[in-house]
Image (spheres, helix red, strand yellow):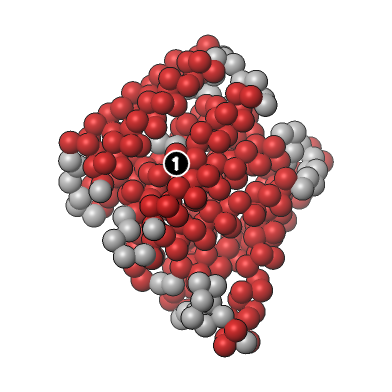
Amino acid sequence: MWLILAFVSALLLGSYDVFKKVSLQGNAVIPVIFVSILFSCATLLPFLILSNFFPETLQGTLFYVPQVDFQTHIMFVLKAIIVLSSWLFAYFAMKHLPISIASPIKATQPVWVVLGALLIFGEKLNLYQAAGIGVTLLSFFLLSVVGKKEGISFRTNKWFWFIVMATLTGAVSGLYDKYLMNQYDHMSVQVYYTFYQAIIMGIITIFLWAPTRKKTTPFKFRWSIAYISFFLVSADFVYFYALTLPDSLISVVSTIRRAGVVVPFFYGAMVMHDKNIKLKIIDLIGVLIGMFLLYLGSK
């Protein structure tokens, strides 16, 4: 069951990337993130209200939000900070890089999760995992070759390094999820950290973006921003729930989720007409093979 949920989450996450790209075209990054989080809060708020004031309506269901203590709230604030750090890097990179380059790089995140588990949790790599990391890193290198054909130098292009930082901080978030899901209810994690994201992003928007908004790219509201929220909330709900099921493995779930890269990749190819698609398809296949090997090694 948790494997099926992981694939569902992958498709939802791929759709999220597409609407993120659509929303960011010619638009200000920071308010796009803030407004999308507000939509997420609006989606989750009814579950929080019902759980606190009318608990009998949701108790015993997947949507009940248990109350947590102060120390736990601190843990969720940390989760919000980590995720927002990843998002800020990812959104800026997604705005300035072809989606057929940015998405495959972000899809290498499970490699860094596995390496993090190796270093932090003392896990050991088996043959499949080692091969998966090797194939993925090779694909990563080949993407840099394709990037040069499009005038993107992976050494000097800051947006490339932004997507790398987004991937690494995303891996940190994945490792932290492994800890949180063993300690706390999945709805508590999703609801509270989303609201803390809204508070933090609101402060960033007011004090960093608003004073300089007339000198930078203007913000334009688009309904695609609401779809960012819908697909992200849905993807995270399925993801967090999958991690609560018996025998579920964070390394496998995280790996399968990245298979959703095919959705934004083909959007870039068919709708945005990104260049060098044939070469990028080879790189994408390499990334997916690397993910599959990681999956085999983590079973």
**Would you place residue 116 above or below residue 236 in this image?**
above
Mark 1 is surrounded, within 10 Å at the Cα level, by few (under 14), some (14 to 19) or many (20 or more) other residues, namely many
**Would you place residue 109 above or below residue 176 in this image?**
above
Image quadrant assignment for residue 100: top right
Give the residue type at disc 1.
Answer: Arg
The number of numbered badges drawn on the structure is: 1
The residue lying furthest to the top in this view is: 149
Residue at which label 1 appears: 258
142 and 230: which one is in front? Answer: 230
Left or right of 43, for residue 140: left
In x, y percent, where is residue 218? 79, 40
* Identity of the residue drawn at 31% across and 55% down: 249
In x, y percent, where is residue 207? 70, 54
**Would you place residue 150 above or below residue 222 in this image?**
above
30 and 21: which one is in front? Answer: 21
Q: Quadrant of the N terminus?
A: bottom left
261 and 96: which one is in front? Answer: 261
In x, y percent, where is residue 118? 23, 47
* Identity of the residue drawn at 53% across and 11% down: 149
Image quadrant assignment for residue 241: bottom left
Q: Is residue 178 visible?
A: yes
**Would you place residue 247 above or below residue 155 in this image?**
below
Determine whether the residue tagged by mark 1 lies in a helix, strand or loop: helix
* Identity of the residue drawn at 31% across and 65% down: 246
32 and 57: which one is in front? Answer: 57
Q: Is residue 172 visible?
A: no
* Identity of the residue drawn at 29% across and 36% down: 293
